[in-house]
Amino acid sequence: MAKLLQAPPKFLPPEWHIANKAQYSGAEAQWSRSERLVDESQRLVDEIERTTQRTQSDVNKRIEQRLEEIRFWKQQLDDKLDQIVKETEVLLTFKTRLEKALEGCKEPLFIAQECLLNRERRVGIDLVHDEVERELIKEVEVLQGVVALLERTLEQANEQIRLNRSAKYNLEKDLKDKFTALTIDNYCSSLTNNAPDIGYAQNVVKVEESSVSPEEWVDFSNVNVEKADRQRNNSLALRALIDSILSQTASDVRKQNDVVNVAFRNRVKETKRAKSLLEAHLAKVMEEVSSQEKNIESLKKAILDKEGPAKVAQTRLETRTHRPNVELCRDQVQFRLMREVQEIGHNVQRLKDTLAQAQAELKGLNRRQLSLEEETEVKANSLYIDEVLCVQMRESIAVNNF
C-alpha cells in the first residue's frame, strides 16, 4: 500500500528550464511558420485576385470583340439578304413579263396558222404559193422560234429564282445562328460576379467535337455572302438578257406581222384588179356571144333565103330539058342557068361553112364565158378568204403584250 501511494518522480530545475525553452522555441517556430504562411497566403490571394481580374477583364474584352465580329457579319448578311430579296422580287416581275409574252404569242401564232389553213381553201389557179403564203410560213416559224426562246429563258429565270432563294435560305439560316450567338454572348457579357443566375457547371472545360475554328467560322459566312453576291450578279445579268430578248422578239414579231399585212394588202389589191379585169372580159365575151348568136341567125336566114333562087334555077334547068328536038340547044341561057345553080350552091356552102365557124365560135365563147365566170368566182372566194377571213382576223393581233 505504501508502494502504491509513492509520489511521482520530480524533475530537476535545469530540466524544467530546458523544457520551457523547448516550448518557447517550438511556439516561436510554429507562429513564425504561421506568420510566413499568412503572409504568403495573402500574397497568393492578392496575386490570384489580380490574375482573376485580369483574366476576366481579358475575357470580357474578347467577348466584346467577338460581339463586334458577330455584329459585323450579321450586318453583312443582313445587307446581302436585303439585296437578294429585292433582286428576287424584281426578277419575279421579269418572269411575269416572260409569261405574258409567251401568252401573247399564242394568239398571233394561232391566227397565222389559221390563215394558212383558210388559204388552203382557195381553189383553182388561186391556190398559189404566193408571197403571202411564204410570209405567213415565215411568221409561223418566227413565232415558234420566239416561243421556244421565251420558254428556255423562262426556265432560266425559274432556275435563277430557285438559286436566289437558296442563297436567301442560307443567309437567313446563318443570320438566325448569328442572332442566337449574339444573344448568348450578350448574355455572357452582362454576367458579373454578383449576378444571381451564375453557378458551377460540370464538364465545361472542353472543346466540342462539332466546333469550328475562327477561320472556318469566317469562311462559312463569307461563302454565304459570296454566293448571294454571285447569284445577285447572275440575276442582274439574266434580267438584262430577258429585257433584250423581250425587246428583240417583240421587234421581230411586229416586223414580220407588218410584212405579212403588207403582203395581204398587196395580194388583195392584185386579186381585186384581176377580178375586175376578168369581169370586164366576161362582159365583152357575153356581148360577143349575143353578137355571134345574131350572126348565126343571120347566116341561117341567108341560107334559107337561097332556097328560093336555087329551086327556081334548078326548076328552069329541069323544065328546059323537055324542049323538043333541035330546040334542045346548049344556048347561053342553058350555060348561065348551070352557072347560077353552081354559084348558088357554092354560095350556100360558103354560108354553111361560115355558119359552122360561127357556131364553133359561139361554143368557144360560151366555154370562155363559163371559164371567166368560174374564174371570177375563184377570185371572189380568194378575196373572201384573204380580205374577210384573214385580214380582219389579223386586226386583233396585239404585239404590245411583250
Image (cartoon, rainbow, N blue to C red):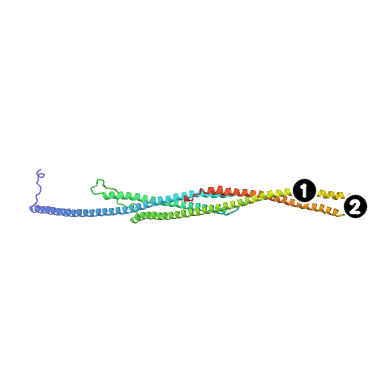
Query: What label sits on residue 3 in the rendered view?
Result: none
**N-term mark: 2 or 1:** 1
Q: Is residue 221 visible?
A: yes
Q: Position of residue 36 (x, y in %)?
A: 16, 55
Q: Distance between the Cα atoms at labels 2 and 1?
A: 33 Å
Q: Position of residue 122 (x, y in %)?
A: 60, 49
Q: Position of residue 380 (x, y in %)?
A: 60, 48
Q: Amino acid at mark 2?
A: Glu
In the image, taking residue 167 as reference, residue 133 lies left or right, namely right
**Nearest the eye: 73 or 184:** 73
In the image, taking residue 146 as reference, residue 311 lies left or right, namely right
Query: What label sits on residue 305 in the rendered view?
Result: 1
Q: Secondary structure at mark 2?
A: helix
Query: What label sits on residue 327 in the rendered view?
Result: 2
Q: Is residue 121 visible?
A: no
Tell me the crowding category of disc 1: few under 14, some 14 to 19, or many 20 or more residues within 10 angstroms, Cα based: few
**Nearest the eye: 239 or 264:** 264
Tell me the crowding category of disc 2: few under 14, some 14 to 19, or many 20 or more residues within 10 angstroms, Cα based: few
Q: Secondary structure at mark 1?
A: helix
Q: Amino acid at mark 1?
A: Asp
Q: Residue furthest top?
A: 1
**Nearest the eye: 333 or 351:** 333
Q: Residue furthest left?
A: 13
Question: Which mark is in front, 2 or 1?
Answer: 2
